Amino acid sequence: MQWQNLTFNQLNANTLYDILKLRVDVFVVEQVCAYPELDDKDRHIETQHLIGLSLTGELLAYARILPPGLSYPEASIGRVVVSPSGRGKGLAMPLMQQAIESALTTWPDAGIQIGAQDYLKAFYQKLGFVACSEMYLEDGIPHLDMRYQGA
């Protein structure tokens, strides 16, 4: 697995297309959830796009890392996704570990908050996140806010 952490301006057209296609295929089509996938946060100058590529260059994993103040007062990690062809290969944990490390390195004093799908609560707890809200519906999917407390 090859990890790259890029700003919007560092993404080439093919990589951006692959990212957006993966996000729409999973979050809109697979999860049957119509929502505004393109929210202008991708283009923010401080937003980081963490991509995990196979040895052949196939996009297998992705996460978007947002600066403090864009979604939450803290830095945030979202749009966390493993492609269907990458599932079952243990990619979600290293993807999140890379994203956490990047957020903490870039904004060491900001903290991290996420809006997690409720069914993934235990996964995020293993990474050091603690629930800080009750469950709520976001685009018809149960979510809860979680803050990083350290692994």
Image (spheres, grey):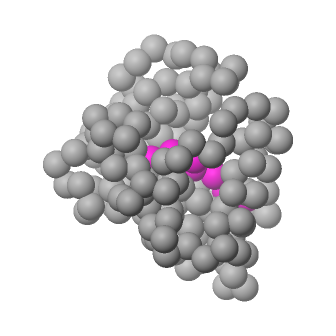
Q: Judge left or right: residue 2 versus residue 71.
A: right
Closer-to-camera residue (48/45): 45
Measuring 43% from the left and 61% from the top, which residue is drawn there?
48
Depth order, front residue of 14/92: 14
Percent of width and height locating residue 124: 47, 40
Which quadrant: the N terminus?
bottom right
Give the residues in magenta. 77-83
* 60 to 26, vertically: above or below: below
Residue that appears at 72% across and 66% down: 18
Identify the residue at horizontal 56%, vertical 25% (top origin): 143
- Per the picture, the main secondary structure of the magenta-coloured stretch is strand
Q: How many marks?
A: 0
Percent x, y of residue 80: 57, 49
Up-down relation of residue 137 to residue 27 (above or below): above
In the image, residue 72 lies at what x, y percent?
A: 35, 34
Residue 111: image location, x then y, percent: 25, 43
Q: In the rendered image, is residue 112 in sight?
A: no
Residue 74 magenta: no
Depth order, front residue of 151/49: 49
Q: In this view, does 124 lie to the left or right of 20?
A: left
Residue 78, magenta (yes or no): yes
Q: Residue furthest left?
A: 109
Q: Nearer the viewer, residue 28 or 12?
A: 12
Question: Which quadrant would residue 61 be assigned to in this image?
Answer: bottom right
